[in-house]
Amino acid sequence: MLTNISEEDGVTSEILATTLGIKLSSVNHHLRNFIDAGLVYRKKDHCTCVVVVSKQLYVR
């Protein structure tokens, strides 16, 4: 899931669910855990809420 998020500038929960073939509720459950851990954050992009990987993960 983190790979899918990091490959884009931001991705919606719905797109993640479709891409991964899992329920939206499962995606949101895991995203809440990622957000709590500081791995990703949500931001508003016009009228859509997107998920973005935190920059601190870009230690390559």
Image (spheres, rainbow, N blue to C red):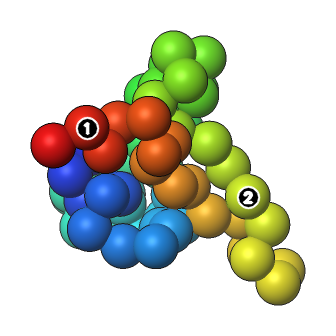
Rendered residue at 38%/47% (across/down): 23
**6 to 26, vertically: above or below:** below
Disc 2: CA contacts within 10 A as few (<14), some (14-19) or many (>=20): few
Rendered residue at 31%/45% (across/down): 58
Q: CA distance from mark 2 to mark 1?
A: 22 Å
Q: Which mark is residue 33?
A: none
**Is residue 60 or residue 12 the one in the foreground?**
60
The answer to whether residue 2 of the structure is visible from this angle is yes
Residue 54 location (% of width, % of height): 50, 42
Asked whether, in this view, residue 1 is left or right of residue 46, the answer is left
User: Looking at numbered disc 2 in the image, what kind of residue is underneath it?
Assistant: Lys
Tag 1, which secondary structure? loop
Residue with the mark numbered 2: 43
> Please, which residue is most extreme toward the bottom here?
46
Which quarter of the rendering shows the C terminus? Answer: top left
Rendered residue at 52%/55% (across/down): 52
Asked whether, in this view, residue 34 is left or right of residue 4, the answer is right
Q: Which mark is residue 59?
A: 1
User: Looking at numbered disc 1 in the image, what kind of residue is underneath it?
Assistant: Val
Residue 51 location (% of width, % of height): 55, 55
Q: Quadrant of residue 56?
A: top left
